[in-house]
Image: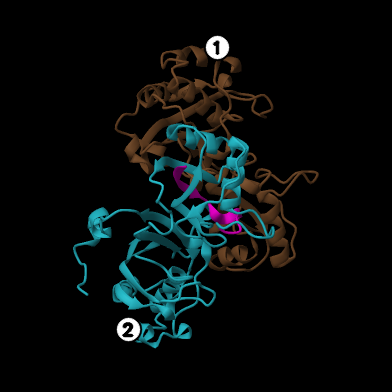
Chain colours: A brown, B cyan
């Protein structure tokens, strides 16, 4: 069997998340990809995906794979898919990979980015791709709090009930904030993410930005393993799955800009 | 009477243009602004607008004005409007101005920007705010053609039937193209614009970019005054009304970056 790996970008606004629903709740990314493949080659497939994004969450670098016998060459696949997909889903790349490649189980680490529009009046053009927070946030405090989340921790306090994970220890290599012109970008890179973990981290960092929490509270919240101690789950629309890495390189090989101040653990 | 001037930004995707329709064809920007004012103070108004944008056209600096007796202070108006407006329309500023101010007749010049996504695969997040043109355009030729449109000309060849203008001479102070990472931005600044003028200019420049026309053809097309000689009307989604200027300053006072190579006319 041929194993095809696709890199997918989508605007999640109109979708009921990535994962095909057992009953029809609304359109999904997976449902669209699978039904376009059916139209292209008449074959039923079930995609594996690197990360099941929730309703309203976006992606610039989602990865999926599926097995097929169809002979369409790799370089023709993006155009073939894109000609039938809705305009808010695009295939960026397609490669035939080793049969043992699995979009989820082979993933080594992932990068998510969360955008906050912290200007008094929300920009209409990015309203679906960022959270609008009109109260001026104390960004320097948020940056300090973010750094305290980096490293190997039990992130149970930062996960929603309903996840499938049985262990809560994850390595969050990078949790950094960049601010430019009132737009905050929170970057999280980790070896794995619990259910809603990035959105709860963002909700907690916003509480720090508002002065409701201090950066020094972060270690306590981690240790408590108590979901109620962390902030709310920030809205889906601000979140984007940016990149999934397969292979031995560390996040600091791929994003050396985060190396300068890497903490030791 | 008090005369209020508003600066308005909107994502035009969901609207049937700026202007309220005599019969209901779909929601409009004007309709929303007028009905929000009715809710706020119970008063029926008719807005004047700097430029009636078409269906799907956006604005970051649209200007409107209206007369009222309501005593709400200027600084409270944006929040009052924005609390009732849909999220794709935002009031950025509100000022009480002289009674003779008229958003349309007092305007001295306007700036429009048109975005083209010239990458092979369209970016999903800007798909509603740019035209996707996958064929690589010859940008240097387009830049030369754009410069040949600058100055005082009869722009009849670059206007659609259906406009209300009786004269076709306009001064296009600036027609420039910037390119970065496969995104082209075409900036047009002029003392007035004929119906669809910017979109026809863009359609014509795209023909130059594809090699179907040469920059040297531009003077002939202008002189012909023949709409059929120019390119098609480029899609509305790429167009944004960016700024309207009131007062004596020239475009080169406000945007000195365009001065360096201003042509003499």
Per the image, label 1 sits on a secondary structure element best described as: helix
Asked if badge 2 and badge 1 are on a common chain, one would say no
Residue B219 is tagged as: 2
Q: Is residue A84 above or below residue A234?
A: below
- State the residue at coordinates (49%, 32%): B72
Foreground of the two, B181 or A206? A206
In reply to whether residue B8 is colored magenta, the answer given is yes
Residue A175 rendering spot, x and y as whole percentages: 43, 30
Q: Which residues are magenta?
A: B1-17
- State the residue at coordinates (46%, 76%): B159
Q: Is residue B208 above or below residue A226?
A: below
The residue carrying pointer 1 sits among few (fewer than 14), some (14 to 19) or many (20 or more) residues within 10 Å by Cα, namely: some
Kindly identify which chain the residue marked by label 2 belongs to.
Answer: B
Foreground of the two, A93 or A181? A181
Residue that mark 1 sits on: A224
Q: Residue furthest front?
A: B1
Residue B65 rendering spot, x and y as whole percentages: 47, 49
The CA span between labels 2 and 1 is: 74 Å
- State the residue at coordinates (59%, 36%): B40
Kindly identify which chain the residue marked by label 1 belongs to.
Answer: A
Foreground of the two, B239 or A262? B239
Per the image, label 2 sits on a secondary structure element best described as: helix
Q: Is residue B10 above or below residue B204?
A: above
Q: Quadrant of residue A259?
A: top left
């Amino acid at each position: 069997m041929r194993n095809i790996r696709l890199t997918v970008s989508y605007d999640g606004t109109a979708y009921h998340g990535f994962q095909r629903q057992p009953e029809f709740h609304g359109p999904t990314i997976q449902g669209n990809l699978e039904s376009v493949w059916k139209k292209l080659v008449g074959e039923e497939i079930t995609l594996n995906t690197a990360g099941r994004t929730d309703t309203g969450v976006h992606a610039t670098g989602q990865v999926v794979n599926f097995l097929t016998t169809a002979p369409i060459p790799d370089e023709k696949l993006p155009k073939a898919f894109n000609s039938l997909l809705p305009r808010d889903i695009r295939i960026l790349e397609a490669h035939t990979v080793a049969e043992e490649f699995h979009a989820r189980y082979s993933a080594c680490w992932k990068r998510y980015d969360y955008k906050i529009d912290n200007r008094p009046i929300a920009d209409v053009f990015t309203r679906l791709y960022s959270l609008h927070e009109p109260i001026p946030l104390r960004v320097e405090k948020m940056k300090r709090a973010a750094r305290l989340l980096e490293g190997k921790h039990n992130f149970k306090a930062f996960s929603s009930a309903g996840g499938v994970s049985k262990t809560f220890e994850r390595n969050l290599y990078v949790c950094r904030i960049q601010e430019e012109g009132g737009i905050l970008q929170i970057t999280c890179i980790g070896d794995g993410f619990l259910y809603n973990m990035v959105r709860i981290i963002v909700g907690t960092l916003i509480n720090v930005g508002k002065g409701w929490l201090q950066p020094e509270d972060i270690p306590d919240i981690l240790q408590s393993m108590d979901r109620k101690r962390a902030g709310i789950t920030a809205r889906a629309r601000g979140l984007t799955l940016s990149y999934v890495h397969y292979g031995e390189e560390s996040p600091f090989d791929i994003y050396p800009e985060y190396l300068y101040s890497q903490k030791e653990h």
